[in-house]
Amino acid sequence: MTHESPLILVIDDEEAMRDSCTQILLKDHFRVETAAEGTSGLRRAAELKPDLVIVDLKMPGISGFEVLEGLRKIDPQMVAVVITGYANVESAVEAMKKGAYDFLPKPFAPEELRIIIRRGLERRRLALEAESLRREKILLEENIITMVTHQLRSPLVAIQQYFEVILSGTVGALEEKQKEMISRARERLDRLLGLINDWLDLARINRGQLVKKFKPFDLKKSLEKLVEFMKPHARDFGVTVEILPFPAPVEVLGDEETLEQVFANLLSNAIQYNRPGGDVKVEIGDSPEAVAIAVRDTGVGIAKEHLPFVFDQFYRVSRSESKKAKGTGLGLSIAKKIVEAHGGTIEVESEPGKGSVFTVLVPKNSGQKPE
Amino acid sequence: MPLKAPKILIIDDDPDFIEAVTPILKSALYDVASVLSPAEVKEKIFGEKPDLIILDIMMDSLFDGFSICHAVKTAPEYQAFHNVPILMISAVKEITGTGFPIKKDDPGMAGPDEYMDKPVKPAELLAKIEGMLKLVS
């Protein structure tokens, strides 16, 4: 509610009634507006957003009941008090069923009106308060991902920290076997932490949030940096990685950090699932509306029956010849979610024994913010 | 190096982190103090007069670390400590990506001088601290 005094709208076809209500309410320092029939009353209610509405049930034109329904649509928390002829208690009850807060039979004394208005406004205040509490709760629920992750990660990180310190030799020398076991424990823990991160990524990436971070940037430059960054990793696997030359900058509108995550994932897969002596090539293709980035490897490839599922969560191609899978099984589904949040697509083609190509299409920067 | 060993104050509500990191710092001959509760931070800073602070981001609430950092860097009561370098650490950086307002991102808040993800590698931690202390001496 604003700091201004509450606004009350009186919808009544009788001028005398509008006037007397206005006088009583103004004396109590409320702000008052009036309307002489239902349709204009609803229009006024929509533009003024009053705190409370007094509605005469019997009016020419649309009935008081219809006004009540209309008011609920404008603001579910709006408090409506109906005025009825004395003998017409049934319709008053009917009105309350339709969501009126209370009724006042005609004729009424100024004090009766005041009491009902005050109670009605108190009810509105409480309703608004409840509403804002509800909103706070929603906010809390949004933060819950962060909180839960903190709860999950903290103990693991503490364990990991102990391992780091023990392995560093700061707190005493380790025997070879002890060192080996703790190193393995550390590795397993690393993967578990990675899994929590991935899961979290999946939970928090949504287009609405991501679009807010969109900025134009040169995707070619960021790919070149990434390829450079991946070279030592590729060398460990005996694989070469390169980006094929492309004559111009490639400006896209997006979130550089998450798009980089997509290509880091594709490159890392292309390297890990390659064969020694194999290579990984990043190719940029261009059309007026979109850029296509292909990541091509010379690895074992993916069998046809697996292809439709590689972007599914936790789907892992079981392969006899490859070492134990390193990833969490979420990487490609995260990649897909990110690309789609950019209005793009990701596809895969593969030939077992020869290699796979992952192609990402992203719209070019058209100079306008997407919806 | 000054005559006295530089003192490092660890502010973290996780006693295990303090327990694990303390020997690393001591191995490099730093003096180490620690505090677990955000409520006791002020008293501790005034009492220990640290040369560097290691500060966790999420303690009782989501952003305790940021409020403490901002206060130490800007509040008049902490004037004597405005220049003490702060190394912020957290297990949850990935949550917001680089979205945590580290220094340049949010001009409204005074950010830390440096940031590290938990768990920290002992060698990296020591290198970072050494660099930070060099800058202020």
Image (spheres, rainbow, N blue to C red):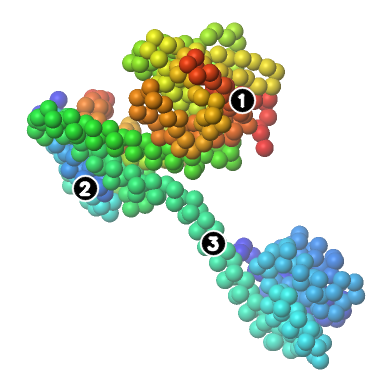
How far is mark 3 from mark 1, CA to CA? 38 Å
Q: Which residue is mark 2?
A: B15
The secondary element bearing badge 2 is classed as helix
Q: Residues within 10 Å of mark 2 (few under 14, many from 20)?
A: some
Task: State the image coordinates of residue A203 (x, y, percent, origin top left).
Answer: 49, 43
| Residue found at x 70% / y 87% | A112
Asked if badges 3 and 1 are on one and the same chain, I answer yes
Question: Label 3 is found on which chain of the structure?
Answer: A
Q: Residue at image x 54%, y 20%?
A: A350
Quadrant of the image for the N terminus of chain A? Answer: bottom right
Q: Position of residue A29 (x, y in %)?
A: 68, 74
Q: Is residue B24 visible?
A: no
Q: Are marks 3 and 2 on the same chain?
A: no
Helix, strand or loop under label 3: helix
Circle 3 residue: A134
Pointer 3 or 1: first along the chain: 3
What's the amino acid at mark 2?
Pro
Q: Nearer the viewer, residue A318 or A95?
A: A318
Indicate the chain on which mark 2 is placed: B
